[in-house]
């Protein structure tokens, strides 16, 4: 799978490959600089590469070359990790970096020549879960439907911003990888950071409320509306884990759903 592109772009393998169900990755050297060769196996990943090409290194990893379902990216070489920040007393700094990255991505205007998924479609799994399981899924779906019917400040969205998808690129700063190619209200892109990087961090009330304040102030978002998007997103994420019979992850997401709902309904 890699060989045609190693020859085409005169790449030198520079590490062990990483193979997943959606893409195959290989660290390489390109014109004497570290890069990452990514060969997509599914349409979502192919479209994500096209979106990163459109972003052109402004908020996302720089695309060095692109052909068919293969993408050559600059490789993150910085020493820092937002997961380490969040788990070792620097969660506020990690949150600000995530907000800055989202802001850079949202600064791009117009629509790329890439198939984008609207949020109405993206949330279909939550509606199905609400019918099947009720309880918190039903409440999340009600809130999601309200938000989706009244979307504001719509943008091209990354769709999966979290602590493992924003990397340290050294002199180039913190940049995003692996977009989902969505379109809708910009507030949505901030919701997933509240679920990460681990339940031990995300479910702590002090972390949740601190993040909430930082995101609202940095992104100039209404507190109650952001909380509604968090409830909606956590419900959707739980629904996907439910489909895959991953009960531990379901319980973790529903715990966060309830936490966000409690803060929302407290109204302070």
Image (tube, helix red, strand yellow):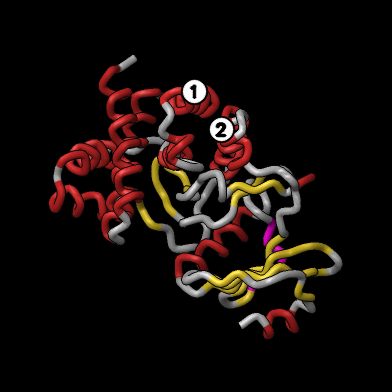
For mark 1, what is the residue? 210
Image location of residue 222, percent across then percent down: 40, 24
Q: Earlier in the sequence, mark 2 or mark 1?
A: 2
Residue 2, horizontal then vertical, whole percent: 65, 80
Q: Residue 89 location, x and y as percent?
A: 61, 28
In the displayed structure, would residue 191 be above or below residue 213? below
Q: Residue at x 52, y 49 (%)?
A: 110
Tell me the quadrant of the picture where the N terminus can be found: bottom right
Q: Residue 84 in the image: x percent, y percent?
A: 62, 40
- Residue 2 position (above or below residue 153): below
Q: Secondary structure at mark 1?
A: helix
Q: Which residue is mark 2?
A: 95
> For the residue carrying disc 1, how many other residues have a C-alpha within 10 Å: few (<14), some (14-19), or many (20+)?
few
Q: Do labels 2 and 1 touch, CB within 8 Å? A: yes
Q: Residue at x 35, y 49 (%)?
A: 249
What span is in magenta?
62-66
């Amino acid at each position: 799978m890699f060989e045609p592109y190693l020859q085409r772009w005169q790449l030198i393998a520079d590490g062990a490959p990483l193979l997943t169900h959606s893409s195959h990755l290989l660290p390489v050297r390109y014109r004497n600089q570290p890069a990452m060769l990514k060969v997509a196996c599914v349409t979502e990943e192919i479209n994500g590469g096209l979106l990163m090409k459109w972003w052109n290194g402004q908020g996302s990893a720089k695309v060095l070359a692109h052909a068919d379902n293969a993408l050559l990216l600059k490789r993150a070489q910085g020493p820092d990790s937002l997961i380490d920040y969040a788990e070792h007393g620097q969660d506020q700094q990690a949150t600000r970096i995530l907000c800055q990255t989202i802001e850079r991505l949202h600064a791009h205007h117009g629509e790329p020549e890439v198939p984008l998924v609207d949020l109405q479609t993206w949330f279909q799994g939550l509606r199905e879960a609400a019918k099947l399981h009720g309880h918190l899924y039903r409440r999340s779906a009600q809130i999601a439907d309200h938000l989706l019917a009244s979307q504001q400040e719509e943008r091209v969205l990354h769709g999966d911003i979290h602590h493992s998808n924003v990397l340290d690129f050294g002199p180039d700063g913190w940049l995003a990888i692996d977009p989902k190619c969505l379109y809708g209200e910009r507030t949505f892109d901030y919701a997933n950071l509240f679920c990460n990087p681990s339940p031990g961090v995300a479910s702590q009330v002090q972390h949740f409320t601190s993040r909430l304040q930082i995101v609202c102030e940095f992104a100039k978002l209404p507190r109650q509306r952001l909380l509604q998007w968090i409830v909606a997103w956590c419900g959707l994420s739980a629904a996907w884990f439910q489909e895959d019979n991953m009960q531990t992850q379901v319980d973790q997401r529903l715990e966060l759903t309830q936490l966000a709902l409690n803060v929302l309904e407290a109204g302070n």
